[in-house]
Image: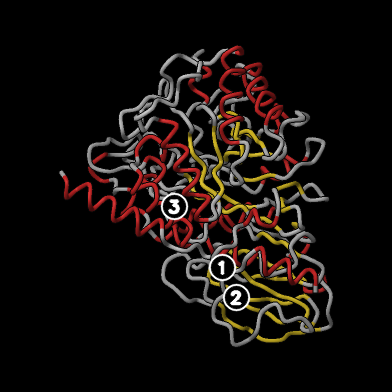
């Protein structure tokens, strides 16, 4: 036993001593997060953009010990993520790895910190501080929606719980509050509003949103809620045509995978607020979730969800993996799929999708950030449907088109400035760049480069030839930071 404890302590010390990607600089050194002036992005107080690249770590507080939590957060940072979404509690009470309860006296927390006991909230504190060390925000889903639906949190309890949470974490620089948790906002709406307003009345430092049920957007219920700073939608885990018997189906049939449509539908509510897909299909989870015999979502699918959503106008994106979000390891069964064929969470971090998300973040931070808009007029002629759909975004002097199937693209280069355009192709799976050349300012047809097996998805990039956002000799876009982008904006 002493050897096991010593090994765990050594691992913890090694992880804790690892420098973050920005050295001593952290994102919040740019100031608190706020909504951009055009109400479509997030930024820091000093003007630096914040591209939310989230990892889904729902059961991190419940299923990891200190060394595991530190290792996970280190690996998340190394893979380019700057946000981890967690369930603060998923039971009343919830139990963590150490057998400690989230609630020891109902919703009264006066005696929650007991001398000599490493309690549930001590471990939560540790996770928040370790994430701060790594330069990572924690998106705190205060309580999972099913618990509220079951009546386990009343309005009176929400005041007590919200007061406890806000006072405990209001001074942590790396918190984003997430109300809800996979549930419609009109189910016990008074509880959600009470919890949100209680936290907001105490904590003036952090942004707040709502995590809805699959195929819904938070704007449906909380578009005008003063406590909600930005919207989340959950595009969900179903494939085209996988209706699965829902009576209250909020989207047209055969659009289940079209997560791009949620951005426009959310912005149809006023006032406009930033929006993000906080739960798309997870890598290696059965399509539709509940039938282990169904096909699994692959890395190409999670890439497609990311680019479709961001190019449609989302201010970032959240990735998830079946094994990671449950923190599966020996001794735990899986909720989705056969337990015998689902890998552990630490094995899952080697799956391709986990490391591929960083390329969309790098790409977005390479070009002028706040002027970017979705614009399907970039695509000349009739566009495709479902997997064949091309999706375009642009600034004043640059454009990007995501192509999932590797088909020919007819692109109107006249939609951006410049008499000539430099054109690149970026492989979405590897981040590899290929310089196509300098071309005339007109409608041009492009055929994507084929650089890897399987799905040949990627991004066509074109910009004013007078600019040097990318150079012909570049083979990959390097890691960009908010710091570099801010410097570029000020030059």
What is the distance, in whole Å, between disc 1 and disc 2 at their CAs? 7 Å
Residue located at (53% from left, 19% from top): 148
Residue located at (64% from left, 56% from top): 51
SS of the residue under disc 2? strand
- Tell whether label 2 touches label 1 (CB within 8 Å): yes
Q: Is 152 in front, or is 274? A: 152
Locate the C terminus by quadrant: bottom right
What is the distance, in whole Å, between disc 2 and disc 3 at their CAs? 32 Å
What is the distance, in whole Å, between disc 3 and disc 1 at their CAs? 28 Å
Q: Can residue 56 be seen in this view?
A: yes
Task: Please state the horizontal and vertical placement of residue 341, each as a whole percent of the image.
Answer: 25, 46
SS of the residue under disc 3? helix
Picture disc at residue 425:
2
Task: Please state the horizontal and vertical placement of residue 257, each as a whole percent of the image.
Answer: 55, 46
Q: Mark 1 highlights which residue?
A: 458
Q: Is residue 375 visible?
A: no
Task: Please state the horizontal and vertical placement of residue 401, each as a whole percent of the image.
Answer: 66, 66
Q: Examine the rendered structure and indicate whether residue 99 appears above or below residue 128.
A: above
Q: Which of marks 1 and 2 is nearer the N terminus?
A: 2
Q: Is 1 in front, or is 92? A: 1
Picture disc at residue 275:
none
Q: Nearer the viewer, mark 2 or mark 3?
A: 3
Q: Which of marks 3 and 1 is nearer the N terminus?
A: 3
Q: Mark 3 highlights which residue?
A: 73
Q: Examine the rendered structure and indicate whether residue 280 appears above or below residue 383.
A: above
Task: Please state the horizontal and vertical placement of residue 347, each as a whole percent of the image.
Answer: 31, 54
């Amino acid at each position: 036993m002493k050897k096991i404890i010593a090994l765990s302590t050594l691992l913890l010390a090694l992880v804790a001593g690892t420098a973050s990607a920005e050295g001593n600089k952290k994102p919040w050194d740019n100031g608190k997060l706020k909504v951009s002036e055009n109400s479509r992005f997030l930024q820091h107080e000093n003007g630096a953009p914040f591209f939310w690249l989230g990892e889904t770590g729902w059961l991190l507080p419940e299923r990891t010990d200190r060394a595991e939590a530190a290792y996970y957060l280190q690996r998340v940072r190394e893979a380019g993520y700057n946000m981890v979404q967690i369930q603060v509690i998923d039971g009343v009470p919830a139990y963590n790895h150490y057998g400690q309860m989230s609630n020891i006296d109902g919703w009264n927390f006066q005696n929650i910190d007991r001398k000599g006991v490493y309690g549930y909230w001590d471990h939560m504190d540790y996770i928040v501080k370790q994430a701060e060390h790594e330069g990572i925000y924690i998106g705190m889903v205060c309580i999972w929606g099913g618990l509220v639906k079951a009546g386990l949190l009343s309005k009176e309890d929400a005041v007590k719980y919200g007061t406890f949470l806000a006072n405990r974490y209001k001074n942590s620089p790396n918190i984003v509050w997430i109300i809800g948790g996979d549930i419609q906002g009109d189910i016990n709406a008074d509880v959600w509003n009470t919890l949100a307003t209680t936290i907001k009345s105490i904590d003036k430092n952090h942004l707040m949103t709502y995590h809805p049920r699959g195929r819904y957007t938070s704007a449906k219920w909380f578009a005008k809620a003063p406590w909600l700073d930005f919207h989340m939608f959950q595009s969900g885990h179903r494939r085209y045509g996988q209706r699965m018997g829902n009576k209250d189906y909020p989207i047209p049939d055969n659009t289940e995978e079209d997560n791009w449509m949620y951005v426009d539908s959310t912005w149809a509510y006023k006032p406009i607020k930033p929006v993000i897909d906080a739960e798309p299909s997870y890598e290696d989870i059965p399509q539709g979730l509940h039938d282990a015999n169904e096909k699994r979502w692959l890395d190409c699918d999670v890439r497609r969800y990311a680019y479709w959503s961001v190019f449609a106008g989302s201010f970032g994106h959240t990735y998830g993996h079946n094994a990671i979000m449950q923190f599966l390891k020996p001794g735990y069964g899986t909720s989705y799929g056969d337990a015998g064929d689902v890998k552990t969470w630490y094995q899952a971090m080697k799956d391709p999708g986990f490391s591929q998300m960083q390329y969309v973040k790098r790409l977005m931070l390479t070009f002028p950030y706040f002027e970017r808009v979705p614009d399907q007029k970039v695509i000349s002629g009739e566009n495709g449907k479902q997997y064949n759909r091309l999706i375009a975004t642009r600034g004043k002097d640059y454009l990007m088109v995501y192509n999932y199937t590797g088909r020919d693209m007819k692109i109107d280069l006249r939609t951006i400035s410049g008499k000539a355009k430099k054109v690149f192709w970026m492989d979405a799976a590897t981040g590899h760049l290929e310089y196509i050349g300098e071309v005339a300012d007109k409608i041009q047809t492009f055929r994507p480069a084929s650089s890897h097996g399987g799905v040949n998805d990627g991004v066509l990039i074109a910009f004013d030839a007078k600019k040097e956002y990318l150079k012909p000799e570049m083979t990959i876009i390097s890691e960009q930071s908010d710091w570099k982008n801010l410097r570029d904006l000020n030059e």
